[in-house]
Image (spheres, grey):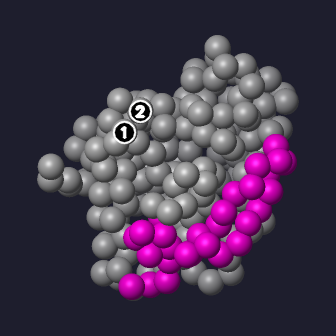
Amino acid sequence: MSHSSRQATSADLDAVVSTLTSAFLRDPVWGPVFPDEARRAAQMAELWRVYADAALRYPWTFVTPGAEAVAVWIPPGGVELTEAEERRRGEVMERVAGAGVARAVEETEASFGAAHPEEPFYHLTILGTHADHRGKGLGMALLSDTLARLDDIGANAYLESTNPANDRRYESVGFVPRGELVTPGGQTVTTMWRPAG
């Protein structure tokens, strides 16, 4: 099977949100942030919509042709969310999931931010494959394709692995564990670094 990727546009937003929601529904970190399993998918979709929409300001969100897999990168000096978008995230989360979830999201993100390296890097903030398309290698092919773009410009890459099952996959494309952080929910997250290739 040949893999290809393209830059996402605003027309992909709904498909991107659907893929990320499916991909992270049972994630060890993001699943428990939304404890109401019956409403988790709808609530989580609102969260990913805020992030995916904001990331489109940069030309670094890539998808497979049908957005079955999504890779969201933030370039050096960029931000995942502006202050206004952070406020919007809080308001949206409080509206759809309550103050407790809104606080858990904010605290989880703050723990990630505190661990960021000082040197410049492209930040792989989200990589996910829709559950309907898992096991086909789409996510790793997309990641490899985007890493080739970074190698072309001599850029470092960084990510937080919220699922230990994925650590070996990241190592297979050149990431090395850099450290660990513990989320407010008590989960251990591995931070990973890939030097410019």
Q: Amino acid at mark 1?
A: Arg
The answer to whether the residue labelled 1 contacts the one labelled 2, judged by CB atoms less than 8 Å apart, is yes
Residue 97, magenta (yes or no): no
Q: Magenta residues?
A: 170-197
Q: Is residue 114 positioned above or below 89 on the image? A: below
Q: Secondary structure at mark 1?
A: loop
Mark 2 nearby-residue class (10 Å; few <14, some 14–19, many ≥20): some
Q: Residue furthest left?
A: 2
Q: Residues within 10 Å of mark 1 (few under 14, many from 20)?
A: some
Q: Quadrant of residue 133?
A: top left
Q: Which residue is under mark 1?
A: 134
| Disc 2 target residue | 131
User: Considering the image in quadrants, where does the C terminus appear?
Assistant: bottom left
x and y, in percent, of residue 185 in the image: 82, 43
Q: Residue at x 45, y 61 (%)?
A: 169
**Spatial CA span between label 1 and label 2:** 5 Å
